[in-house]
């Protein structure tokens, strides 16, 4: 019995260390990323993706802490509930934290992101984007906007634009809807559960032809 208890403890410690530093399961709590991700999916978040100098790129699906950008104050949570949540989230049974979000990176530092052109397409540095990952029937945005993403920040949006509270919804708040790169927890690289949906989240080529900011193709927003 003592040996079984010790083995259980070692396994739990291993899972917590793996979740904290390498790969963290993340339970999808809403439909904001449909049809790429569905409610109840467990994605595996690669926490080493940006640890060695690589930065989030346009098109990456990232998990981030929205405190200070999407959420201005941390929700109250008692110690017992926090401990239960930490343990359950390490194996993907609960959402890691109420301030954690999963969205797609649309603009990085220096990018000008605009909605929309005459054909209703999103523009990044003047380049129209064919967003083949959008939920069927969605338009890129029903809310017009024209922003330049500050250096060190990200402009993020859900794939189900009609059911996503994302950077567009926080334009008038501190940070202007952008998320600091330092708040990114990791990149969602795989769907780990349910069994029938196990797959890697391949990179989209939607942003392949976007010019870099400052090359003469991207302007500043008007007014």
Image (cartoon, rainbow, N blue to C red):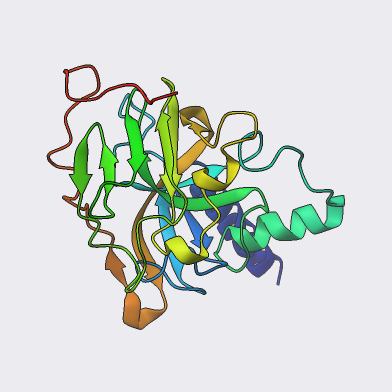
Q: Residue at x 24, y 25 (%)?
A: 218
Residue 113 horizontal/vertical position (percent): 35, 36
Residue 27 horizontal/vertical position (percent): 53, 65
Q: Is residue 84 left or right of residue 156?
A: right
Q: Is residue 84 above or below residue 68?
A: below
Quadrant (top left/top right/bottom left/bottom right) for the N terminus? bottom right
Q: Is residue 32 left or right of residue 117?
A: right
Quadrant (top left/top right/bottom left/bottom right) for the C terminus? top left
Instruction: Determine which quarter of the picture holds residue 108.
Output: top left
Q: Is residue 214 left or right of residue 189?
A: left
Q: Residue at x 33, y 83 (%)?
A: 196
Q: Residue at x 40, y 35 (%)?
A: 146
Residue 110 horizontal/vertical position (percent): 34, 22
Q: Is residue 160 visible?
A: yes
Residue 65 horizontal/vertical position (percent): 58, 41
Instruction: Determine which quarter of the picture holds residue 135.
Output: bottom left
Nearest the viewer among 115 and 106 is 115
Nearest the viewer among 126 and 222 is 222
The total number of labels drawn is: 0
Nearest the viewer among 27 and 143 is 143
Q: Is residue 22 visible?
A: no
Q: Is residue 200 above or below residue 136?
A: above
Q: Is residue 211 left or right of residue 98?
A: left
Q: Residue at x 48, y 37 (%)?
A: 184
Q: Residue furthest bottom?
A: 196
Q: Is residue 211 above or below residue 95?
A: above
Q: Residue furthest left?
A: 209
């Amino acid at each position: 019995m003592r040996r079984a208890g010790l083995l259980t403890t070692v396994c739990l410690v291993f899972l917590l260390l793996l979740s904290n530093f390498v790969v963290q399961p993340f339970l999808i709590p809403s439909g904001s990323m449909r049809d790429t991700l569905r409610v109840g999916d467990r994605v595996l978040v690669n926490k080493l993706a940006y640890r060695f100098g690589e930065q989030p790129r346009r098109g990456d699906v990232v998990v981030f802490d929205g405190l200070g950008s999407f959420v201005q104050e941390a929700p109250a949570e008692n110690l017992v509930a926090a401990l239960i949540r930490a343990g359950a989230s390490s194996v993907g049974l609960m959402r890691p934290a109420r301030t954690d979000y999963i969205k797609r990176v649309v603009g990085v530092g220096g990018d000008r992101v605009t909605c929309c052109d005459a054909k209703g397409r999103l523009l990044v540095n003047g380049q129209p984007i064919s967003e083949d990952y959008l939920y069927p029937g969605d338009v890129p945005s029903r809310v017009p906007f024209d922003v330049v993403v500050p250096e060190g920040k990200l402009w993020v949006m859900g794939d189900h634009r009609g059911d996503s509270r994302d950077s567009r919804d926080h334009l008038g708040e501190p940070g202007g809807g952008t998320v600091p790169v330092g708040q990114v927890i990791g990149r969602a690289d795989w769907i780990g559960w349910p069994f029938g949906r196990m797959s890697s989240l391949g990179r989209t080529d939607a942003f392949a032809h976007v010019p870099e900011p400052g090359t003469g193709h991207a302007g500043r927003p008007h007014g």
